[in-house]
Image (spheres, rainbow, N blue to C red):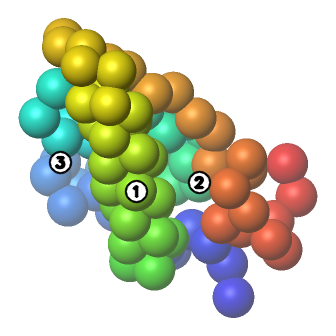
């Protein structure tokens, strides 16, 4: 089973897609989690990225966990403001069978 959804045509512009990495950004209140190098199908025309369901779910859950941990840490220090967390998909073993 591949980690990338095998979408052949872009849903938005109907052009061909190809495998490639993308970056996903999640915003949870004052915390932004950026996950880099996520395997996806990318539209060659409009650059829309498509991530398969199980991988997308795993990354969403990871982002929520990271955001909660950061929020708790900031609250503990009584800090305020916007915080950005940047991580890489391979740092979390979400794709154990995929070569990087």
Residue 75 vertical placement versus 16 (above, below):
above
Residue 76 image offset from top left, x and y in percent: 32, 31
Which of the 4 image quadrants contains residue 50? bottom left
Crowding at dot 3, Cα within 10 Å, few <14 / some 14-19 / many 20+, comes out as: few
First in residue order: circle 2 vs circle 3: 3
Which of the 4 image quadrants contains residue 53? bottom left
Q: Could you tell whether 43 is left or right of 46 in the image? A: right
Q: Is residue 12 visible?
A: yes
| Quarter containing the N terminus | bottom right
| Secondary element at tag 1 | helix
First in residue order: circle 1 vs circle 3: 3
Of residues 30 and 76, the one drawn nearer to the viewer in this rendering = 76
Query: Residue visible at 51% across and 27% down?
Result: 86
Which residue in the structure is indicated by mark 2?
39
Which residue in the structure is indicated by mark 3?
13
Residue 19 vertical placement versus 67 (above, below):
below
Residue 54 image offset from top left, x and y in percent: 45, 80
Of residues 18 and 30, the one drawn nearer to the viewer in this rendering = 30
Q: CA distance from mark 2 to mark 3?
A: 20 Å
Of residues 90 and 83, the one drawn nearer to the viewer in this rendering = 83
Q: Which mark is residue 78?
A: none
Q: Which mark is residue 65?
A: 1
Which of the 4 image quadrants contains residue 7? bottom left
State the residue lying farthest toward the right.
99
First in residue order: circle 2 vs circle 1: 2
Closer to the observer: label 2 or label 1?
A: 1
Q: Are marks 1 and 3 in contact (CB under 8 Å)?
A: no
Query: Residue visible at 32% across and 40% down?
Result: 72
């Amino acid at each position: 089973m591949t980690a990338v959804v095998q979408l052949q045509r872009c849903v938005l512009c109907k052009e061909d897609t190809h495998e490639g990495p993308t970056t996903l950004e999640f915003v949870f209140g004052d915390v932004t989690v950026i996950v880099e190098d996520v395997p996806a199908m990318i539209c060659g025309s409009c650059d829309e990225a498509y991530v398969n369901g199980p991988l997308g779910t795993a990354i969403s859950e990871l982002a929520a966990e990271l955001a909660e941990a950061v929020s708790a840490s900031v609250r503990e220090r009584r800090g305020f403001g916007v915080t950005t967390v940047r991580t890489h998909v391979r740092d979390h073993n979400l794709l154990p069978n995929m070569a990087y």
